[in-house]
Amino acid sequence: MDTPAKERNTKQKRLILDCMKSSGRHMNVEEIYGIIKKHDEKISIATVYRNLRMLEQQGVVKKLYMAEDSPSFYEFNDNGEHTHHHLVCSRCGAIIDFEEDLLESLEKTIEEKKGFKIKDHRVVFYGLCRECREAEK
């Protein structure tokens, strides 16, 4: 007997979330697919994309926008609020979280002057990580 679509969908979401939790890092779709394929060989990459899109719409995960030519990465959205920025190494591709919200005062100014309530913003800084800078020396 086939598994109902809703149950299968829940199982697939759980596999994706478990994969992301156990990795402890930002992951792209291909990485997630490669890992969960070992647990569910019937799953397709299209299913992973679809479930990530649903999880993003539900606010469970956030899609990170890095660069036009790079794959999208995903991370958990623990509280639904902006909590950090990202630093991307242009040599090795490492994604490093920067925990301080550097734009809080700018957001307040925009809200006061324009009456516009900012719910989120995304800032990515590009450069070289410590390891790549050390390797250059």
Image: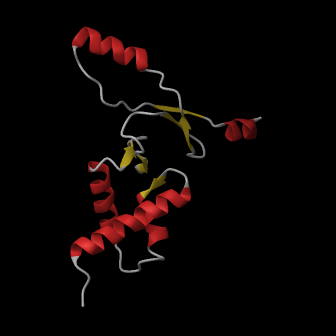
**Can residue 89 be seen in the rendering of this structure?**
no
Q: Residue furthest right?
A: 137
Q: Is 98 left or right of 12, judged from the image as shown?
A: right
In the image, residue 122 sits, relative to residue 10, either above or below, namely: above
The coloring applied to the image is: secondary structure
Q: Is 84 left or right of 13, judged from the image as shown?
A: right
**Residue drawn at the location 42% of the way across and 68% of the way down:** 15
> Looking at the rendering, in which quadrant would you find the C terminus?
top right
> Looking at the rendering, in which quadrant would you find the N terminus?
bottom left
**Residue drawn at the location 41% of the way across and 78% of the way down:** 40
Q: Position of residue 17 (x, y in %)?
A: 42, 60
Report how many numbered discs are placed on residues in the image: 0
Q: Position of residue 68 (x, y in %)?
A: 38, 42
Q: Position of residue 90 (x, y in %)?
A: 55, 39
Q: Residue furthest front?
A: 79
Q: Nearer the viewer, residue 126 or 57?
A: 57
**Can residue 77 be seen in the rendering of this structure?**
yes
In the image, residue 128 sits, relative to residue 78, either above or below, namely: above
Q: Residue furthest top?
A: 113
Q: Position of residue 60 (x, y in %)?
A: 35, 50
Q: Quadrant of residue 96?
A: top right
**Residue drawn at the location 22% of the way across and 79% of the way down:** 4
**Residue drawn at the location 47% of the way across and 25% of the way down:** 101
